[in-house]
Image (tube, grey):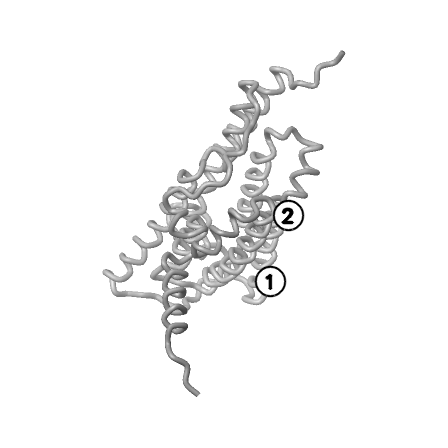
Amino acid sequence: MTSTAPSRASRVACFVYGLSVYALFLATFVYTIGFIANIIVPKSIDSGAIGSQWTSIAVNALLLGLFAIQHAIMARPWFKARWTRIIPPAVERSTFVLATCIVLIIMFWQWRPMPTNVWHITNEPLAAALRAMSAGGWALVLYATFCIDHFDLFGLRQVTLNLRGMAYLHPGFATPKLYQLVRNPLMLGFLIAFWSTPVMSIGHLQFALMVTGYIFVGVNLEERDLLKSLGTSYAKYRAETPMLIPGLKLRRNATNAHVAGQPQTT
């Protein structure tokens, strides 16, 4: 009788693959910060040869659309179920992360700059405050991943358990720390990082607008999947916790309660 358990060599290969992808993620994450902030990296959002503005808008839209399609498809449960018939389940998340990194690298490489400024804040204290807010947004992104399970999110936990011959169990639904304030603190961090800038070029504005639009689409797709899989527990959490802005739903509920308590007049 042939064993269906993966061999030691296969488990080691999966682990090396997952570890390599995680290292690539870290490098890509750091490069993304430099790309958006126009610092350190050789090719940033506002650097490079300047071409036709309409051509640049079209190319950048295609690049961002590629990112959105990759994320929207590969994150869906139906795709994961079919994909793991082809690849080992232990590397499914690592492969998603790899695909994301590849798409981002293509975007960095092919991005067409449009450096004409939409706004340029010259007041240094205000400019410094915006740069600090952007850095805080990136810190929030990273911290939010550790509030849940950073290494599971980027596939390292899966390949480590596989290497040890242990079954993978999904961390399950939880609302730790930041997730008690908003449902999507990670996405809130991205929005802060992208929009808090003393110099907003046309190219940066296109990036921020399109990614913001996708964040709202992506969050709704993800929450639809969570409602299907978790049912009433997630529905209750969704009803009680704002999507992105802390306290927003509480203030809205308080306002509604106040209005509801007023005598009606005709």
Quarter occupied by residue 87: top right
Name the secondary structure under disc 1.
helix
Seen from the viewer's position, the closer of residues 190 and 89 is: 89
Q: Residue furthest left?
A: 125
Kindly indicate whether the residue at mark 2 contacts the one at mark 1 (C-beta within 8 angstroms).
no
How many numbered marks does the figure carry? 2
Pick out the residue farthest to the bottom.
266
Task: Judge from the rendering whether residue 180 lies leftward or rightward of residue 82; answer left or right.
Answer: left
Q: Amino acid at mark 1?
A: Ala
* Residue under the point 44% across and 66% down: 116
Please say if 37 is above or below 144: below
Q: Locate the C terminus and report the quarter of the image it occupies.
A: bottom left
- Side (left or right) of 118 relative to 66: left
- Residue 58, which numbered label? 1
Any part of residue 147 in sight: yes
Give the residue at x 71% y 32%. 86
Determine the image quadrant of residue 261: bottom left
Which is nearer the eye, 2 or 257? 257
Out of 225 and 10, give the one closest to the viewer. Answer: 225
Q: Locate the N terminus and report the quarter of the image it occupies.
A: top right
Observer able to see residue 106: no
Separation of marks 1 and 2 at Cα, in angstroms: 22 Å
Instruction: Name which quarter of the figure residue 229 lies in.
Output: top right
Q: Is residue 29 above or below residue 194?
A: above
Q: Position of residue 241 (x, y in %)?
A: 43, 54
Image mark for residue 73: 2
Q: Rate crowding at label 1 as few (under 14), some (14 to 19) or many (20 or more) other CA atoms within 10 Å.
A: few
Q: Amino acid at mark 2?
A: Ile
